Amino acid sequence: MTRHPAPVADRRDHVATYHGIARNDPYHWLRADNWREVMQDPNMLPANIRIYLEAENSYFEQGFGARTTDLQDAIYKEIRGRIKEDDSGVPSPHGPFAYNSKMLEGHQYPVLVRTPRAGGDEPEARLMAGEKQAPRLWMPQHWPAWLLLGCLRLLAPLPWSLLLWGGRWLGRVMFHLVPVRRAVTLRNLELCFPALAAKERRRLARRCYESFGMGAMEALIAYYSPPERFTGRSPIDGAEHLEAARAAHRRGRVHVRARAGPP
């Protein structure tokens, strides 16, 4: 069987300058600019890159693929044989139970288990398992964060004005409780507005913190509230163009909006 020569990628100059240093990458053309879309749909890979990659794959299969299948399988089994598959971590005690993650033989992802700290006849409880990776977010050290998210979820349905009032006070509290960040803010304002009196800069910094707290509440509202809650709160100019593009199934739609902090 005649072996074809190995494919050689074209060299195409592509000079990029970073930190004042020019660097020529002649193989930059092999990097698809739409690589995010290609990860979702390989058919979107540019034709010139696809042709070269298929030539590389064809060369490998012709010269090494079929006749090295047994060797590849042997190397894979040897590497896997040197890995301890049935492994577990250090238990994390919390309350009457200890939580742990462990690897099972033949599985690719860990499972999350719970065992009673006092021992006894109660069997080990498998909290999350399967081929999907068992998230570690359910471990006890993350429970305070989950409690905070639950409280925020309960706050979301409150009246808009009440939430913004609470956000304003949250910013004021943070202004006094985090002296390091307050000092940074005041220093930045001093550099930007040297003509302002210290009292005015402090008042401006406090308003920045209030705006930050109100913005946090607005983010909370946006995340947990249904779209109907925002109807009529801000005008939308040019909505007919968006609807026309949507009706025409055009993929390139750009939404432009401005956001100003609360007064």
Image: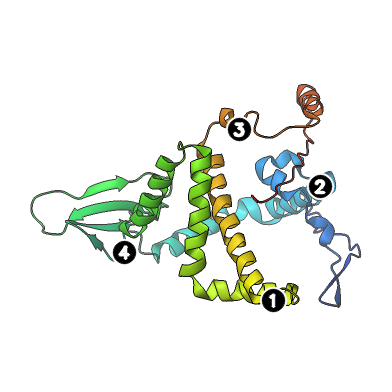
User: Between tags 4 and 2, which lies in front?
Assistant: 4
- Helix, strand or loop under label 4: loop
Going 44% across and 59% down the picture, which residue do you hit?
77
The answer to whether the residue labelled 4 contacts the one labelled 3, judged by CB atoms less than 8 Å apart, is: no
Q: Residue type at mark 1: give it.
A: Glu
**Residue beneath disc 3:** 230
Q: For residue 83, what is the image quadrant?
A: bottom left
Q: Residues within 10 Å of mark 4 (few under 14, many from 20)?
A: few
Q: For residue 150, what is the image quadrant?
A: top left
The answer to whether the residue labelled 1 contacts the one labelled 2, judged by CB atoms less than 8 Å apart, is: no
**Residue beneath disc 4:** 89
Q: Is residue 187 above or below residue 155?
A: below
User: Between tags 2 and 3, which lies in front?
Assistant: 3
Among numbered discs 4 and 2, the one appearing first in the sequence: 2
Tell which of 145 and 251 is nearer to you: 145
Residue 159: image x %, image y %? 49, 37
**Residue beneath disc 2:** 51
User: Between tags 1 and 2, which lies in front?
Assistant: 1
C-alpha separation, residue under disc 1 versus residue under disc 4: 51 Å
Residue 27: image x %, image y %? 83, 63
- Helix, strand or loop under label 2: helix
Q: Is residue 94 above or below residue 127?
A: below
Tell which of 30 and 92 is nearer to you: 92
Going 71% across and 44% down the picture, which residue do you hit?
37
